[in-house]
């Protein structure tokens, strides 16, 4: 049975996690609780509850008498996140291929959507598709625990992806090429090729982010 405030809290949580925390402009600032409440159409109480949930995930820092602070992502965390993604995604490639369920067609479809908006969309739309592309592979591996762990990285994934695009005018096309290499490796049924393509892709993004 849900408490009466759960719906508002969950809506605030999803809005903050999916919209606010994936915006590089918010990094280094305090979240305006009233602005979030107005945007979502709820009171400030469920917003505060949502911020408590996000603090438990280390996505915000609660500062007494100030509110929720969105700290910049430090270089060490960037490196560790890329490493974690590499472990999960390369495992997912090998596992899904061995089970005969690598989502080649679905990933190729998302890649096609990325190509269609490469020159039109804002950075976040492009990276949302990037996140979907990688999530399809992890989901296909069939491990729900790792799937939830990977999903917990999503807000950071989108945030860092947007930052990477903002730092390089050629990064969008590079992402398309790197994604194509991953799809090609999976389509050929070659786990080693797919794994190398995944790691090259993550290394490219990580290197770009560490320059800042």
Image (cartoon, rainbow, N blue to C red):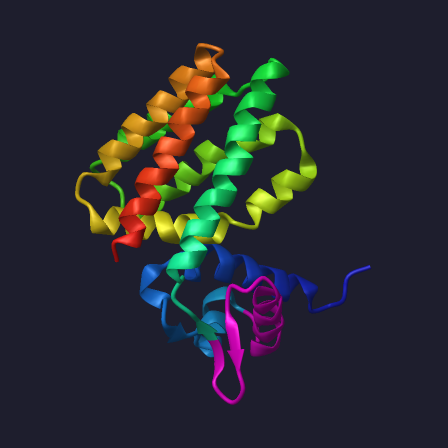
Q: Residue at x 49, y 48 (%)?
A: 154
Magenta region: 42-68
Q: Quadrant of the C terminus?
A: bottom left
Q: Quadrant of the N terminus?
A: bottom right
Of 29 and 197, the residue lying toward us: 197
65 in magenta = yes
Examine the rendering and report whether any part of residue 66 can be seen.
yes
> Residue lying furthest bottom in this view?
65
Examine the rendering and report whether any part of residue 109 can be seen.
no
| Residue 207, image x, y percentages | 30, 46
> Residue lying furthest right in this view?
1
Q: Above or below — where is 40 with respect to 151? A: below
Q: Above or below — where is 21 with respect to 136? A: below
> Residue lying furthest top in this view?
188
| Residue 92, image x, y percentages | 56, 28
Q: Residue at x 40, y 23 (%)?
A: 182
Residue 147 figure quarter: top right
| Residue 117 as seen in the image, left or right of residue 182 | left
Q: Residue at x 49, y 11 (%)?
A: 189
| Residue 107, image x, y percentages | 45, 24
| Residue 4 as seen in the image, left or right of residue 72 | right
| Residue 104, image x, y percentages | 47, 18
Residue 111 figure quarter: top left
Count of numbered badges drawn on the protein: 0
178 in magenta = no
Q: Residue at x 47, y 43 (%)?
A: 83
> Residue lying furthest left in this view?
169
Q: Above or below — where is 198 with respect to 35? A: above
């Amino acid at each position: 049975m849900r408490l009466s405030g759960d719906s508002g809290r969950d809506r605030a949580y999803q809005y903050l996690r999916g919209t606010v925390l994936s915006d590089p402009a918010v990094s280094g600032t305090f979240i305006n609780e009233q602005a979030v409440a107005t945007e979502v159409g709820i009171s400030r109480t469920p917003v505060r509850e949502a911020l408590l949930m996000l603090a438990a995930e280390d996505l915000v820092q609660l500062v007494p008498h100030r509110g929720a602070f969105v700290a910049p992502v430090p270089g060490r965390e960037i490196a560790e996140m890329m490493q974690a993604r590499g472990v999960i995604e390369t495992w997912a490639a090998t596992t899904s291929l061995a089970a005969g369920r690598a989502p080649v067609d679905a990933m190729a479809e998302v890649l096609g959507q990325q190509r269609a908006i490469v020159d039109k969309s804002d950075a976040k739309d492009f990276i949302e598709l990037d996140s979907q592309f990688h999530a399809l592979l992890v989901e296909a591996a069939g491990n729900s625990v790792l799937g939830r762990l990977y999903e917990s990285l999503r807000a950071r994934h989108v945030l860092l992806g947007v930052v990477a695009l903002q730092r390089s005018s050629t990064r969008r096309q590079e992402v398309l090429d790197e994604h194509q290499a991953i799809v090609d490796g999976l389509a050929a049924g070659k786990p080693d090729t797919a794994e190398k393509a995944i790691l090259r892709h993550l290394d490219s993004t990580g290197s770009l982010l560490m320059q800042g």
